[in-house]
Image (spheres, rainbow, N blue to C red):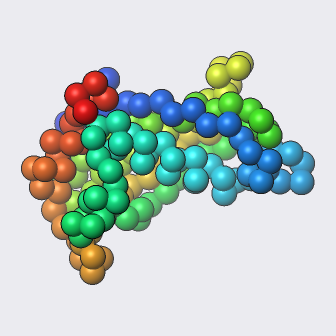
Amino acid sequence: MTQTIATNSVRSVVSVRVRFGETDLMGIVHHGSYVTYMEVGRVEWLRRRGVVYATWAQRGLHLAVVELTLRYLAPARFDDELDIEVTLGQVRAASVRFDYRIVRPADGVLCAEASTRLACVDDHQTLRRIGPEISEVLARSEAAS
């Protein structure tokens, strides 16, 4: 079962500034740093809807990354400000997909596009259906939290 999503209510933008340690010897953001930016955006996306992820984890609810796609389009460099645009792209019976656009707002350049699929699992990594409590949170807009 796939849930239809109103994408205008499930989008957040999180700003980050590239730190020196996130760059390679050429001064360009290291490819692995983008995965961290995506996680920062995703956790903030949840927080803006009233979810403290650690609270979910304490209750035995986890969203484990099971798939990641990432396409690099333009380099970002040390001290660039980046906007991480996070959108809930899909909700299935036991997984969700988040889509990302990483944009340099100074010039509007799209640096990367990505997506992650996260499976809903318990403390024993057993797949769980996404229940009404989670579905309700995922459907919230930022203003509703």
| In this picture, residue 130 sits left or right of residue 34 | left
Q: Is residue 102 visible?
A: yes
Query: Residue at 37% across / 64% down in the picture?
Result: 64
Query: Residue at 27% across / 80% down in the picture?
Result: 124
Vertical placement of 50 versus 58: above or below? above
Where's the C terminus, which quadrant? top left
Query: Residue at 39% across / 36% down in the picture?
Result: 87
Number of marks in the rendered image: 0
View extreme (bottom): residue: 124
Residue 19 at x, y = what percent? 74, 45
Vertical placement of 78 versus 25: above or below? above
Q: Is residue 99 visible?
A: no
Residue 67 at x, y = what percent? 44, 60
Residue 31 at x, y = what percent? 70, 53
| In this picture, residue 120 sits left or right of residue 112 | left
Vertical placement of 40 versus 68: above or below? above
View extreme (right): residue: 26
Quadrant position of residue 93: bottom left
Residue 89 at x, y = what percent? 34, 40
Query: Residue at 15% across / 42% down in the picture?
Result: 136
View extreme (left): residue: 132
Task: Work out whether residue 94 or residue 37 is closer to the camera in this orientation and state it.
Answer: 37
